[in-house]
Amino acid sequence: QKEVEQNSGPLSVPEGAIASLNCTYSDRGSQSFFWYRQYSGKSPELIMSIYSNGDKEDGRFTAQLNKASQYVSLLIRDSQPSDSATYLCAVVGNEKLTFGTGTRLTIIP
Amino acid sequence: DAGITQSPRHKVTETGTPVTLRCHQTENHRYMYWYRQDPGHGLRLIHYSYGVKDTDKGEVSDGYSVSRSKTEDFLLTLESATSSQTSVYFCAISEHSGGGYQPQHFGDGTRLSIL
């Protein structure tokens, strides 16, 4: 079982709709969770951090964390073509940061 | 943007040659990391540093060495490059605070091709 799992996609979402990206992790003791966005040919860019159960909102982005079920998700409201990218989930467990392989998101105009 | 500069940005070299990649930061962060990114594998940690002359191995360290003689510089060396080391290499930095783990911020990457 991979330590951090994401559906590789591609996930296609119409412009203006909500994009929902999911990530599950295996280390029950994980405490810190991050979402990165990576455009093709570019470096990963941090877009959200979440450390406690519940929702955290930042503009059009909402991160959701459920430690009991060991999943973290990212919602993108009012999706725009500029949101088309690969989204990487990253989880800290035992002082080690592990990345998922990413979900490729395409916003369809 | 975090002040991280990687050099070179692109490099093509031949099997068996030594290669050194440089990461330079202006943030005075304690932690620095080298990753490689390959299709289907995501980001994998090669080596990291938690201070000057303090380094440790990551999950894919074979064939790589690192050095950190100054806070701002972290070098990755491929002693004898192989085709399997063709990849995109990213440097990252972070600062662990008393409040817990802080996220990493990435440089622009080096695209390395070994023929």
Image (spheres, coloured by chain):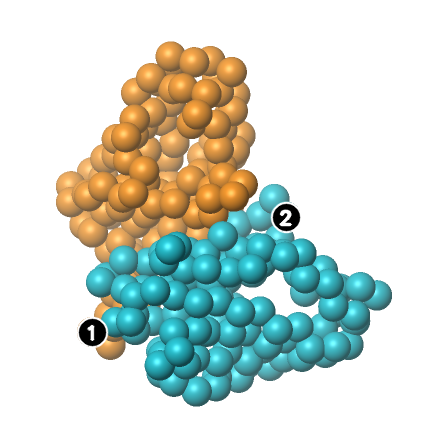
Chain colours: A cyan, B orange
Which of the two residues, B23 or B45, is positioned nearer the viewer here? B45
Instruction: Identify the subunit bearing mark 2.
Output: A
Give the image location of residue A6, x and y in percent. Answer: 51, 60
Whether B110 is drawn above or below B31: the answer is above
Tell me the quarter of the image containing the C terminus of chain A. Answer: bottom right
Q: State which mark lies toward you, 1 or 2.
A: 2
Circle 1 is placed at which residue position?
Answer: B98
- Going 43% across and 47% down the picture, which residue do you hit? B43
Is there CB contact under 8 Å for labels 1 and 2? Answer: no
Which label is found at residue A93?
none
Residue that protrudes farthest toward the bottom in the picture: A54
Give the image location of residue A24, x and y in percent. Answer: 44, 67
Amino acid type for the residue under numbered disc 1: Gly
- Going 34% across and 45% down the picture, which residue do you hit? B45
Q: Can I make out residue A78 in this image?
A: yes
Q: Can I make out residue B3 in this image?
A: no
- Going 46% across and 21% down the picture, which residue do you hit? B83
- Disc 2, SS: loop
Which of the two residues, A52 or B70, is positioned nearer the viewer here? A52
Residue that protrudes farthest toward the front in the picture: A1
Circle 2 is placed at which residue position?
Answer: A40
Give the image location of residue A61, x and y in percent. Answer: 58, 77
- Going 23% across and 47% down the picture, which residue do you hit? B49
- Disc 1, SS: loop
Give the image location of residue A64, x and y in percent. Answer: 48, 80
Instruction: Identify the subunit bearing mark 1.
Output: B
Which of the two residues, B78 or A70, is positioned nearer the viewer here? A70
Quadrant of the rendered image containing residue B74: top left
Residue that protrudes farthest toward the left in the picture: B53
